[in-house]
Image (cartoon, rainbow, N blue to C red):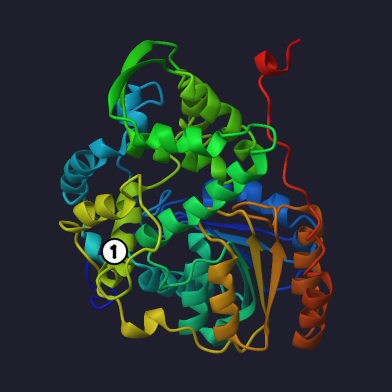
Amino acid sequence: MDPAQPQGRQITLKVALIPALARNARQDPVVFVAGGPGQSAVDLAGHAMALFPRLLNRRPLLLVDQRGTGRSAPLYCDDRVPPTRPLAELVDARRLPLDLAACRQRLQQLPHGDLRHYSTTVASADLEAVRQALDLGPLNLFGGSYGTRAALDYLRQYPGSVRRLLLDGVAPPDMVLMRSMPTDQRATLDALLASAEPQRPGLTQRWQALLAAPARDWPVRHPFSGRDETLRVDGALLASLVRPALYQPAAAAALPSAIDRAAAGDLGPLLALATPGPSPSGRPGLAQGQHFSVVCSEDAPLLDTQPAAPSPDPAGTEALYRRICADWPRASVPPDFYRLPVSPVPVLLMSGGQDPATPPRHAQRVLQALGPKAVHALVPQAGHGVSSLGCLRELMHRFIDADDDTAALAAAREGADCAKDVPRPTPWRALSETAP
C-alpha cells in the first residue's frame, strides 16, 4: 500500500482487460482513466467501449480502478444512504464537513485506511505495475476531467510507457480545483443567462436577486421520494443547485426556465436538475474519501501560494474545501508533480467552450507546456466532455490508429475543428409558458 514499504500492508487493485476482437491484436491497449477524482473506471466500462468501437477491434481496453475507488481499496462515504434521503442531506453542502469528518474516522479504521497513500503520483505507479504485470506494450491513455491530470502524471513519470495521450476536459496538476471552480462556473452561467436574455428579459437580474435574498424556509417536494419537505434556502444553496446542469448544455438549456420558476417561488425544477439519481453500479458515483485525499493533498497546499480568485464564490466552495482539508491526512506530493515537461509523444487535447469545470483556458496552458506534439480540439458550444461527439470519436480513432507520430499529428490537426460548428441547445420553455 505504501510504495516506500513494499513488504508492508498490501491492497488489491480491480483490473478489467477487455480483449480485442481481431485474432492478431496489437499489444498497445487503450486505457480509460476515470475522472472525479473518485470515479471507478471499471464501472464505466460500457461508456469506454462506446467511445472506441473501432479501435477495440485491434486493441484491448484496459480499465483499472484507481486505489480508493470502485473495488480497489474503496473509500466511499455515502454508500449506506439511499437517494431518497432528505433533500437537506442530498443538496445542502453546509452539512458536508460534519458528514465527512465522521466518514474520515470510519475510513481510517479500515485495513486500507491510511489516507496518506491515495494520490495521483501513487496511482500512476499502480498503473505502471499493472502494465508490467500484464506484459503490455506502451499505453494509449484516454483521460477525462481529473483523469487528464492522472494521465499527465503518468506521462511525466513513465514517458517510455506511453504511445498516445488523449485528454478530454483538461485539469492541469496546478489547477487548484476549489479556486478555479467558482470562476469557471460563473463564466459558463453568465454566458448561458446572456444567451437566454432575448427570450427572457431581466433573467440575469432575477438570478442575482435570488442569490442576494435572505435565507428562508421553502416548501419543496423530494424529486425521488415524493415527500413534502422544508428546505432552508439561501444564495449559497442556489448557486450550488445550478452547477450540475451546467456540465451538459442539453441540461443547461433547462436552467433559464428553472431559474424563472424559482424566482416565482417554485424550487422544484432546480432541485430536479441538481439532485443525483441512483448509480447504475449500485454504488455511489464518487468515492468521496479518495476525492478528498487527492484534492487535499494536491490542490489545497497551493491555495496560499496563488492569487485569490477573481470572481465571487457564492456557493462558498473554497471555504468548504478549506474546512474539510484542514483535518484531512495528506500525501507527500513531489514538487515535479506540478511541472509539465515537453511531451515526447503525440497528445490530443479536447475542450468544450461552455465547460464549467475544465474550460479551454486550462487546456491552453497545457498545450503550451507540452510543446509541438500537442494539438487542441475546441468545441465552442459544448460542455464538460466532448469525446462522445461523432466526429471526435472518429478523430480519436485516426489519432490512435496512425502508425507513426507524424501521421497521428497530421490526423489531429486535420480534424481538430470538426465540431466547431456544433450549436448550443435552444433554451427550454415549460409547457405552461408556451400555452396560448
Q: Where's the C terminus, which quadrant?
A: top right
**Label 1 SS:** loop
Q: Where's the N terminus, which quadrant?
A: bottom left
Q: Toward the viewer: 196 or 227?
A: 196
Q: x, y percentage for residue 376?
A: 68, 73
- What is the quadrant of residue 202 in the picture? top right
Q: Is residue 111 visible?
A: no
Residue behind mark 1: 10
User: Residue at the location (70% across, 59% down)?
Assistant: 380
- What is the quadrant of residue 58 in the picture? bottom right
Specify the amino acid type for callout 1. Gln
User: Residue at the location (33% across, 62% down)?
Assistant: 294
Q: x, y percentage for residue 76?
A: 33, 44
- Left or right: 132 as drawn, with respect to 371: left
Does 431 sit above or below residue 159? above
Q: Toward the viewer: 401 or 347?
A: 347
Q: x, y percentage for residue 117?
A: 27, 66
